[in-house]
Amino acid sequence: MKKFTILSIALLVFAATLEYPQGGESQRAIGQTATPQPKAEDPKNLGYVSPEFAENFSQQQIDQINANVETLLLTQSCVRCDLRAVKLVNLRLKNAIVTGADFSDANLSGSRFEISDFVNTNLARADLSGAELIGARISNTNLRKANLTGTNLDGADLRFSDLRDANLSNANLRNANIDGASIDRASMGGTTMPDGRKNQ
């Protein structure tokens, strides 16, 4: 009988130790409230890439774009390079060769590209406001929705370029060749045309 009583007590104690942790866990779960975790800072090293476009690229792509910019600055040439969304304000290059490069969404405002080669380049949505592209070769180039406000394109070759929906307000197209260029819906208020006539 004594053995039976001791065994019963032992079993009761064992059962109690199994139940308490479960009850404790459920109590803790009920008492807890979800606290928002602080958002980790973006670890990307953007370099020349505009922050507003950074989420569109992986770190590997950003590193490649930055390397391409360094190549361009060092050699004034970067053929078929990925230069998307770069910010190169007030850049000064002469005889630069960027044939086939992708400058979409780039900010090149105030830059000077004298007698440079932009043939077959993608400049869609690029900001070239106030830039100087005197005598530049920009034929067969995508300039759709580009900002060319006040841009100096004197003597530039724009043949067969896509300028649809671009902003050419107050731009200088004197002596430029725009044969075959698409200028549908382009804003051209105050633009100086190839023949020297100024739009109203």
Image (spheres, rainbow, N blue to C red):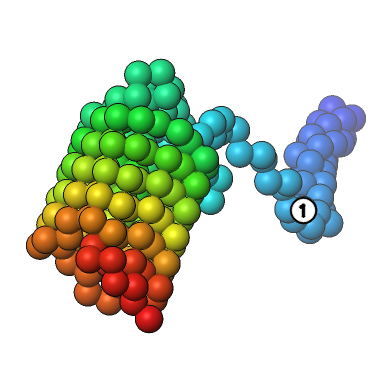
State the image coordinates of residue 22 (x, y, percent, origin top left). Answer: 75, 46
Q: Nearer the viewer, residue 77 or 103?
A: 77
Q: Nearer the viewer, residue 130 or 144?
A: 130
Residue 42 lies in what quarter of the image?
A: top right
Instruction: Determine whether 83 is above or below 55 in the image.
Output: above
Residue 62 lies in what quarter of the image?
A: top left
Q: Nearer the viewer, residue 198 or 72?
A: 198
Q: Which residue is mark 1?
A: 35
- The quarter of the rendered structure image containing the C terminus is bottom left
Q: How many marks?
A: 1
Instruction: Determine whether 78 is above or below 154 in the image.
Output: above
The type of residue carrying mark 1 is: Thr
Residue found at x 44% / y 60%: 150
Residue at the left extreme? Answer: 180
Residue at the front extreme? Answer: 196
- The quarter of the rendered structure image containing the N terminus is top right
Residue 82 lies in what quarter of the image?
A: top left
Direction from residue 25 to residue 84 in the image, left or right: left
State the image coordinates of residue 169 (x, y, percent, origin top left). Answer: 41, 69
Residue found at x 55% / y 45%: 51
Residue at the top extreme? Answer: 74
Whether residue 182 can be seen here: yes
